Amino acid sequence: MTMERAIETFARGYCFTRAFTHPYTAARAGPLWILRDGPRKSGNPRREEFISYGVEPKQVHQVVRRHARGHYCICAVHDPGEEGDLLRDGFKSLGYRLGHTEFMMTHSLKRIPRAPAPLPVGWVSSVVTGDTTWCANMFVKPKYRRRGIARSLMCRLLRDDRAAGAHMAVLLASHVGANLYMAVGYREIGTLMVFTPKRK
Protein backbone atom coordinates (compact mmCIF):
# COMPACT_ATOMS: atom_id res chain seq x y z
CA MET A 1 0.00 0.00 0.00
CA THR A 2 2.82 2.42 0.86
CA MET A 3 4.49 1.82 -2.52
CA GLU A 4 1.28 2.49 -4.47
CA ARG A 5 0.69 5.72 -2.53
CA ALA A 6 4.31 6.75 -3.02
CA ILE A 7 4.14 6.11 -6.77
CA GLU A 8 0.90 8.08 -7.11
CA THR A 9 2.44 10.93 -5.11
CA PHE A 10 5.52 10.85 -7.36
CA ALA A 11 3.36 10.80 -10.51
CA ARG A 12 1.09 13.67 -9.48
CA GLY A 13 3.82 15.76 -7.84
CA TYR A 14 6.20 15.35 -10.77
CA CYS A 15 3.44 16.34 -13.22
CA PHE A 16 2.72 19.45 -11.16
CA THR A 17 6.34 20.61 -11.44
CA ARG A 18 6.44 19.86 -15.19
CA ALA A 19 3.17 21.74 -15.80
CA PHE A 20 4.61 25.23 -15.24
CA THR A 21 5.21 25.72 -18.98
CA HIS A 22 2.52 23.42 -20.42
CA PRO A 23 -0.02 21.02 -18.84
CA TYR A 24 1.58 17.69 -17.96
CA THR A 25 -0.84 14.99 -16.85
CA ALA A 26 -0.85 11.71 -14.94
CA ALA A 27 -3.25 8.95 -15.95
CA ARG A 28 -3.54 5.18 -15.62
CA ALA A 29 -3.25 2.72 -18.50
CA GLY A 30 -3.95 -0.66 -16.97
CA PRO A 31 -1.22 -1.38 -14.40
CA LEU A 32 0.95 1.59 -15.48
CA TRP A 33 0.96 5.31 -14.85
CA ILE A 34 1.46 7.50 -17.94
CA LEU A 35 2.92 10.99 -17.49
CA ARG A 36 2.66 13.14 -20.61
CA ASP A 37 1.86 16.53 -22.11
CA GLY A 38 -1.75 17.61 -22.24
CA PRO A 39 -3.18 18.44 -25.70
CA ARG A 40 -0.92 20.75 -27.70
CA LYS A 41 -1.72 23.19 -30.50
CA SER A 42 1.94 23.80 -31.34
CA GLY A 43 5.43 22.64 -30.44
CA ASN A 44 6.82 19.17 -29.99
CA PRO A 45 5.57 17.07 -27.07
CA ARG A 46 7.97 16.29 -24.26
CA ARG A 47 9.08 12.75 -23.47
CA GLU A 48 6.36 10.55 -22.00
CA GLU A 49 7.10 8.55 -18.87
CA PHE A 50 5.52 5.21 -18.03
CA ILE A 51 5.76 4.06 -14.40
CA SER A 52 5.51 0.37 -13.56
CA TYR A 53 5.63 -1.55 -10.30
CA GLY A 54 5.27 -5.31 -9.94
CA VAL A 55 4.68 -5.76 -13.68
CA GLU A 56 6.82 -8.03 -15.87
CA PRO A 57 8.91 -6.20 -18.51
CA LYS A 58 7.12 -7.98 -21.37
CA GLN A 59 3.70 -6.78 -20.14
CA VAL A 60 5.05 -3.24 -19.58
CA HIS A 61 6.41 -3.24 -23.13
CA GLN A 62 3.02 -4.33 -24.54
CA VAL A 63 1.14 -1.57 -22.69
CA VAL A 64 3.73 1.03 -23.72
CA ARG A 65 3.54 -0.02 -27.40
CA ARG A 66 -0.25 0.48 -27.31
CA HIS A 67 -0.17 3.88 -25.58
CA ALA A 68 3.10 5.65 -26.48
CA ARG A 69 2.65 8.64 -28.77
CA GLY A 70 6.31 9.36 -29.38
CA HIS A 71 9.54 9.65 -27.39
CA TYR A 72 9.25 7.87 -24.01
CA CYS A 73 10.99 6.18 -21.11
CA ILE A 74 9.94 3.48 -18.68
CA CYS A 75 10.39 4.04 -14.94
CA ALA A 76 10.31 0.55 -13.42
CA VAL A 77 10.18 0.47 -9.63
CA HIS A 78 11.24 -2.54 -7.59
CA ASP A 79 11.30 -3.28 -3.86
CA PRO A 80 14.61 -2.99 -1.95
CA GLY A 81 14.94 -6.76 -1.47
CA GLU A 82 14.21 -7.53 -5.13
CA GLU A 83 16.96 -8.20 -7.62
CA GLY A 84 17.18 -5.27 -10.04
CA ASP A 85 19.21 -7.40 -12.45
CA LEU A 86 16.08 -9.35 -13.43
CA LEU A 87 14.31 -6.13 -14.47
CA ARG A 88 17.38 -4.84 -16.27
CA ASP A 89 17.86 -8.10 -18.17
CA GLY A 90 14.14 -8.32 -19.00
CA PHE A 91 14.05 -4.83 -20.48
CA LYS A 92 17.40 -5.32 -22.22
CA SER A 93 16.02 -8.40 -24.02
CA LEU A 94 13.19 -6.17 -25.30
CA GLY A 95 15.57 -3.55 -26.73
CA TYR A 96 15.85 -1.08 -23.82
CA ARG A 97 18.88 0.30 -22.05
CA LEU A 98 19.17 1.39 -18.43
CA GLY A 99 19.78 5.13 -18.16
CA HIS A 100 19.99 5.64 -14.40
CA THR A 101 18.53 4.60 -11.07
CA GLU A 102 17.19 6.55 -8.09
CA PHE A 103 15.94 5.51 -4.67
CA MET A 104 12.26 5.99 -3.92
CA MET A 105 12.01 7.16 -0.33
CA THR A 106 9.21 8.03 2.08
CA HIS A 107 8.98 9.76 5.43
CA SER A 108 6.15 9.01 7.89
CA LEU A 109 6.36 12.57 9.31
CA LYS A 110 6.15 11.15 12.84
CA ARG A 111 9.73 11.81 13.96
CA ILE A 112 11.56 14.74 12.44
CA PRO A 113 15.03 15.57 13.77
CA ARG A 114 15.80 18.97 15.23
CA ALA A 115 18.03 21.15 13.09
CA PRO A 116 19.08 24.81 13.26
CA ALA A 117 17.09 27.27 11.17
CA PRO A 118 18.40 27.22 7.59
CA LEU A 119 20.31 30.18 6.20
CA PRO A 120 18.76 31.93 3.18
CA VAL A 121 21.21 30.33 0.73
CA GLY A 122 19.01 27.62 -0.73
CA TRP A 123 15.47 26.41 -1.14
CA VAL A 124 13.26 23.34 -1.08
CA SER A 125 9.63 22.89 -2.05
CA SER A 126 6.92 20.28 -1.81
CA VAL A 127 3.76 19.60 -3.77
CA VAL A 128 0.63 18.49 -1.91
CA THR A 129 -1.09 15.45 -3.45
CA GLY A 130 -3.99 14.56 -1.16
CA ASP A 131 -2.60 13.65 2.27
CA THR A 132 0.94 13.13 0.94
CA THR A 133 3.61 15.50 -0.33
CA TRP A 134 6.22 15.25 -3.09
CA CYS A 135 9.59 16.95 -2.56
CA ALA A 136 9.82 18.75 -5.88
CA ASN A 137 13.33 20.15 -5.63
CA MET A 138 16.06 21.22 -3.26
CA PHE A 139 19.02 23.48 -3.92
CA VAL A 140 21.84 24.95 -1.83
CA LYS A 141 24.25 27.47 -3.34
CA PRO A 142 27.55 25.65 -4.07
CA LYS A 143 29.75 27.68 -1.71
CA TYR A 144 27.43 26.89 1.24
CA ARG A 145 27.20 23.13 0.73
CA ARG A 146 28.38 20.54 3.31
CA ARG A 147 27.44 22.81 6.24
CA GLY A 148 24.14 21.20 7.30
CA ILE A 149 21.97 23.65 5.38
CA ALA A 150 20.28 20.98 3.24
CA ARG A 151 19.47 19.03 6.40
CA SER A 152 17.94 22.15 7.99
CA LEU A 153 15.92 22.85 4.86
CA MET A 154 14.58 19.29 4.77
CA CYS A 155 13.64 19.32 8.47
CA ARG A 156 11.77 22.60 8.00
CA LEU A 157 10.00 21.23 4.91
CA LEU A 158 8.92 18.07 6.77
CA ARG A 159 7.61 20.07 9.73
CA ASP A 160 5.64 22.35 7.38
CA ASP A 161 4.26 19.32 5.51
CA ARG A 162 3.13 17.73 8.78
CA ALA A 163 1.59 21.00 10.01
CA ALA A 164 -0.38 21.22 6.75
CA GLY A 165 -1.92 17.79 7.43
CA ALA A 166 0.28 15.48 5.34
CA HIS A 167 0.73 11.92 6.57
CA MET A 168 3.62 10.91 4.29
CA ALA A 169 6.35 12.64 2.30
CA VAL A 170 7.85 11.12 -0.86
CA LEU A 171 10.93 11.85 -2.96
CA LEU A 172 13.39 10.31 -5.37
CA ALA A 173 17.04 10.38 -4.32
CA SER A 174 20.28 9.92 -6.18
CA HIS A 175 22.79 7.51 -4.70
CA VAL A 176 24.74 10.50 -3.34
CA GLY A 177 21.69 12.32 -1.94
CA ALA A 178 20.18 9.28 -0.23
CA ASN A 179 22.42 9.68 2.85
CA LEU A 180 21.05 13.17 3.54
CA TYR A 181 17.44 12.01 3.33
CA MET A 182 18.03 8.99 5.56
CA ALA A 183 19.64 11.30 8.12
CA VAL A 184 16.35 13.24 8.43
CA GLY A 185 14.20 10.11 8.67
CA TYR A 186 13.36 9.01 5.14
CA ARG A 187 13.51 5.30 4.41
CA GLU A 188 14.10 3.58 1.11
CA ILE A 189 11.03 1.70 -0.12
CA GLY A 190 12.26 0.90 -3.62
CA THR A 191 14.50 1.70 -6.55
CA LEU A 192 13.31 3.43 -9.70
CA MET A 193 15.13 2.28 -12.84
CA VAL A 194 14.75 4.48 -15.93
CA PHE A 195 14.82 2.58 -19.24
CA THR A 196 14.80 4.06 -22.73
CA PRO A 197 14.50 2.29 -26.07
CA LYS A 198 17.84 1.71 -27.75
CA ARG A 199 18.47 3.97 -30.74
CA LYS A 200 18.10 2.26 -34.06
Image (cartoon, grey):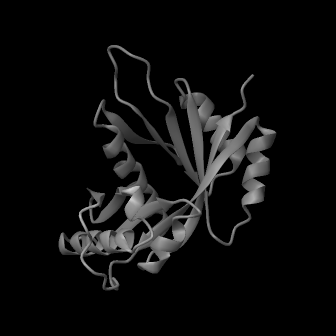
Q: Is residue 89 left or right of residue 134?
A: right
Task: Tell me: residue 198, above or below residue 87.
Answer: above
Numbered circles on residues, count: 0
Residue shown at 31% from the left, 69% from the top: 153
Q: Where is residue 125, by image quadrant? A: bottom left
The percent coordinates of residue 142 (x first, y second) are 42, 57
Query: Between 20 and 54, which is closer to the camera in this rendering?
Result: 20
Q: Position of residue 39 (x, y in %)?
A: 34, 23
Q: Residue at x 35, y 51 (%)?
A: 13
Residue at 31% from the left image edge and 82% from the top image edge: 115
Residue 86 seen in the current view: yes
Locate the C terminus by quadrant.
top right
Above or below 95: residue 103: below
Residue furthest top in the image: 42
The answer to whether 41 appears left or right of 96 in the picture is left
- Residue 167 can be seen in this image: no
Q: Residue at x 58, y 38 (%)?
A: 73
190 over 9 or under it: above or below: below
Counting from the top left corner in percent of width and height, residue 43 is at 38, 16
Q: Nearer the viewer, residue 31 or 108?
A: 108
Q: Is residue 146 above or below residue 191?
A: below
State the residue lying farthest toward the left.
164
Residue 55 in the image, given as x and y percentages of width and height:
63, 52
